[in-house]
Amino acid sequence: MSGVTKAVRRTVLSVVRRMPPAAVHLPDPATILSAMPVAVVVLAEDNRFAYANPAAEQFLGLSVSQLAQLSLSDVLPEDSPLFLMVGQLRSGASSIADHDLSFEGPRIRKTGISVQGTTVAEEPGHVLLVLQDSTTVRALDRQIAARNAARSITGMAAILAHEVKNPLSGIRGAAQLLESSVSEPDRELTVLIRDEADRIRALVDRMEVFGEKPVTMEPVNIHRILEHVRRLARSGFAEGLRFSESYDPSLPPVWGNRDQLVQVLLNLVKNAADSLHSTGTHEGEITLMTRYQHGLRLATPSSDSDGRVDLPLLVVVRDNGPGISEDIRPHLFEPFVSSRPSGQGLGLALVAKIVADHGGLIEVESRPGRTEFRLHLPMVAEEDSA
């Protein structure tokens, strides 16, 4: 890859030389390419990988030495739109961009990818591609929208608690009084009135949990929470399902609220169990994972002066169920959206709110046979542990 690397460096240098003199003092171009947070690859004339920066290694899940032995067709099927983009660049287009692409091949499976491409002038037939995964940004946008919707529920719940709960108590009490003095057919109606009043009150109670109450944060061992949730699930709604764990034992504590994190994970595991039970298969499996990862930072109102906080702690809940339908997936964390006929659609909305209150991010990726919820959470900062 050395020849192409030099050509890429010369391209960067030519840009630097055209900049005003005061801006010329920059690091070596190779250092700039290596430090870039987006994936940069160069394809030779035969579509073999001629260059890849460290971000591209992470994006593709392959090292530079492995990529040097592969071509684009080893990573993606030849009907991928990326081949059309590369062909257009070689046919004379100086630059090209496309968005929301799906990469599904034997070595990679990603959606929501943005691609920018250009030719490398000093290496005929060579194409430079910049690859960027926009799924995290979209997940954040959806989470912000869901949180705003949750706030509207807060106001609605306050109104309902005042305007509905009191009349409901009167209706329920009247039904109880009538129950002992009416005939058997009418007694069934009084029981129906009482049960429906209880159901409406329970719904209002569930909506009240969206309230903006102060939450006490402290260092939390996420593995103890996961084991607690697993024990609860196996003795109840997930009985008969197989669990597997893949934990990073060196993971530092999460900065959060134990009870709320239990609620989040219990909700995600219950959704996974319900999905598996709906298939009637005996091969249902729920996987719980933790991992430390660098690179994801998120702006939060409660973060430090720079307005951003690191989210290096990854918690995954995965199942091998039928998956989530595409029409529901973009709205999954919005209130009153549910894939189950009997669902009220408040569970995942509450999950999104709690994760956002922790300064974290939740993502979902789903296809038949694999649904994965990923929680990105903050670790305990030095000032918090002091």
Image: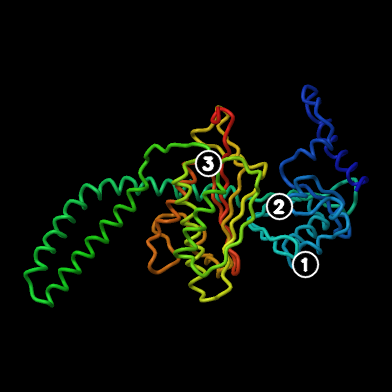
Q: Nearer the viewer, residue 362 or 141?
A: 362
Residue 138 sits above or below residue 30 on the image? below
* CA neighbours of label 1 inside 10 A, class few (<14), some (14 to 19), many (20+): few
Q: Secondary structure at mark 2?
A: strand
Which label number is shown at residue 320?
Answer: none
Total numbered labels: 3
Considering the numbered disc 3 on the image, is that residue within a helix, a strand or a loop? strand
Horizontal side, residue 327 vs residue 192: left or right: right
Q: Up-down: is 101 above or below 33?
A: below
Q: State the residue position of label 3.
A: 220
Quick one: 26 or 228, which is closer to the camera? 228
The residue at 20%/69% (across/down) is 192
Location of mark 2 (residue): 115
Colour logic: rainbow
Between circles 3 and 2, the one closer to the viewer is 3
Instruction: Name the residue nearer the viewer: 80 or 286.
Output: 286
> How far apart in space, not on screen, are marks 3 and 1 (Cα)?
47 Å
Residue under the point 35% across and 44% down: 211
* Residue 245, horizontal then vertical, whole percent: 61, 57
> Which comes before the other along the chain, label 3 or label 1?
1
**Amino acid at circle 3:** Val
Report which residue position mark 1 lands on. Answer: 78
> Within 10 Å of the Cα at label 3, are there few (<14), some (14-19), or many (20+) other Cα atoms?
some
Give the residue type at disc 2.
Val
Whether pointer 2 and pointer 1 mark residues with C-beta atoms closer than 8 Å, the reply is: no
Q: What's under tag 1, amino acid-wise?
A: Glu
N-terminal label among 3 and 2? 2
Percent of width and height locating residue 355: 49, 46
